[in-house]
Amino acid sequence: MKIVEIKRDKKHTVKVTLDNEKAFNFDIDYWNSICFHENDTITEEQLNHHLQESEYIRAKARGIWFLDRADYSEKTLYEKIVAGGISSAAAARAVARIKELGLINDRKFAERLANLMSESNISKREAYAKLYNKGLPKEIIKSVLEETPFDETEQIAAIIDKKYRAKMNTKENIQKVYAALIRKGFSYSAVSEAIKRYTKELEYNEEY
């Protein structure tokens, strides 16, 4: 096959048209690196190889672009790359290379998020759901949450002081607070213990 036209298509791509009237887009930097010109001949095997390599380069560039703006799990990064029109094979290869370079690490990502959630008084159960929704593997989530301190009683007390203190004035309101805390993923025993301690402190303060 003969290359009949090479034309800048977008900012980062060139459009290469062959004498069979088929056209293909390549990453511009990759295309320049392989040194093909108009009227050169390219075999089917060469074409397929260079298309795969070009798409891999695009996939890797997109992955790094995403990571420059936010943290992602391997799974979520792969899905973001594929959503941009990249093939699953190129996306998987790019994520593997990005991981090899140390630019993405599911365990460190999970540890960072787990610590932030613990400090933000998010229950361990809710933290599990949030980490899972980030595309992190279950085995990593379980391991990280086992190693991250979640003091539910202290977390609940902090939430009550910040959000529910004014509502802890009747049995009915206390029940509503109790239900709200359970919905946040805290255990029944921890919620009961925290509310019991809080109401005793409240009674003591009212007496004195």
Image: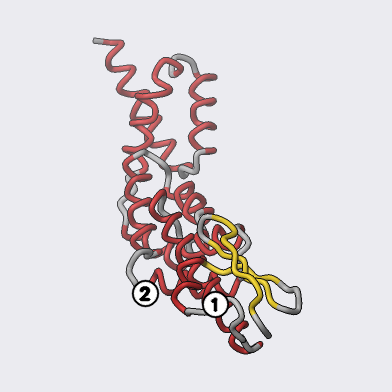
User: Regarding mark 1 in the picture, which secondary structure is present there?
Assistant: loop
x, y (%) of residue 95? Answer: 47, 69
Q: Secondary structure at mark 2?
A: helix
In the rendered image, the vertical position of residue 202 relative to residue 44, given as above or below: above
Disc 2 or disc 1, which is closer to the eye?
Answer: 1
Q: Residue at x 48, y 79 (%)?
A: 35
| Way the structure is coloured | secondary structure
Give the quarter of the figure containing the C terminus.
top left
**Residue 3 vs residue 15, the one in the foreground:** 3
| Residue extending farthest front | 39
Residue 197 vs residue 6: left or right? Answer: left
Q: What residue is shown with label 2?
A: 100
The residues bearing labels 2 and 1 have C-alpha atoms spaced at a distance of 34 Å
Residue at 34% over, 71% down: 101
Q: Which residue is located at x 47 percent, y 54 percent?
A: 131
How many labels sit on residues? 2
Q: Quadrant of residue 196?
A: top left
On residue 135, the disc is: none
Tell me which corner region of the image, top left, top right, bottom left or bottom right, holds residue 15.
Answer: bottom right
Query: Which of marks 1 and 2 precedes in the sequence?
Result: 1
Q: Residue most toward the left? A: 208
Relative to 183, does residue 92 appear above or below in the rendering?
A: below
Q: Are marks 2 and 1 in contact (CB under 8 Å)?
A: no
Residue corresponding to mark 1:
37
The amino acid pointed to by label 1 is His
Residue 135 % position (x, y): 52, 59
Badge 2 density bin: few <14, some 14–19, many ≥20, Cα 10 Å: few
Q: Residue furthest right?
A: 20
The kind of residue tagged 2 is Glu
Q: Nearer the viewer, residue 11 or 118?
A: 11
The residue depicted at 47 percent of the width and 49 percent of the height is 125
